[in-house]
Image (tube, helix red, strand yellow):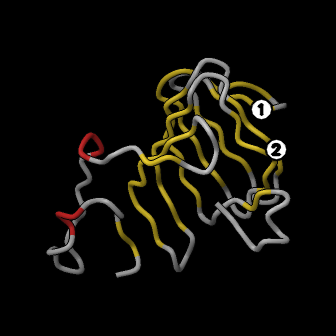
């Protein structure tokens, strides 16, 4: 199966069409390559690029300049998340169209649920062929 919750070992024995219940509290936070930003991947499909994840941003952390290769959706649970167009706080939802480009930061820290249809392309990664 291409779609998985990477650290949910209890899913290994499930039938192909069984529901996957994810106990987010049981998953460990994983560091991203960006200082102060950690992730819990709730669902990921490597083949399609689809990912749903919780992100924990430390106060003052920043995600560098990147392009959304498809629609990205974020719902802020705690704290705030900002970019040059505005700031989302608890209970706010923001989505960005494919092709949009920005950097993002968290002034006071943030916990957010994000859905990606395809991975972001970080500016400068093109030479290395990398996405995140």
10 Å crowding of disc 1: few (<14), some (14-19), many (20+): some
Q: Which mark is residue 102?
A: 2
Percent position of residue 74, x then y:
58, 41
Q: Which mark is residue 73?
A: none
> On the rendered structure, is 25 left or right of 85?
left
Position of the C terminus, as image quadrant, is bottom right
What's the residue at 52%, 80% (across, down)? 47
Q: Which callout, 2 or 1, points at the residue further toward the start of the chain?
A: 1
What's the residue at 23%, 80% (across, down)? 16
- Element marked by disc 2: strand
Image mark count: 2
Quarter of the view holding residue 8: bottom left
Query: Marks 2/1: CA distance?
Result: 7 Å
Q: Which residue bears the numbered disc 1?
A: 83
Percent position of residue 20, x then y:
24, 62
> On the rendered structure, is 26 left or right of 96?
left
- Element marked by disc 1: strand
Vertical comparison of 63 with 111: above or below: below
Percent position of residue 51, x then y:
50, 61
The reply to whether callout 2 and callout 1 are in contact (CB within 8 Å) is yes
Quarter of the view holding residue 7: bottom left
What's the residue at 74%, 57% (across, down)? 68
Given residues 14 and 94, the one toward you in this image is 14
């Amino acid at each position: 199966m291409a779609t998985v919750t990477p650290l949910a070992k209890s899913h290994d024995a499930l039938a192909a069409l069984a529901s996957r219940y994810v106990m987010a509290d049981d998953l460990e936070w994983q560091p991203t390559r960006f200082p102060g930003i950690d992730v819990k991947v709730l669902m990921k499909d490597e083949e399609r690029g689809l990912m749903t994840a919780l992100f924990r941003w430390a106060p003052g952390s920043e995600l560098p300049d990147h392009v959304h290769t498809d629609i990205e959706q974020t719902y802020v649970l705690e704290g705030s998340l900002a970019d040059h167009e505005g700031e989302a706080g608890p209970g706010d939802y923001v989505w960005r169209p494919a092709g949009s480009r920005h950097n993002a930061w968290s002034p006071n820290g943030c916990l957010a649920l994000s859905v990606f249809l395809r991975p972001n392309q970080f500016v400068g990664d093109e030479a290395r062929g990398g996405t995140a």
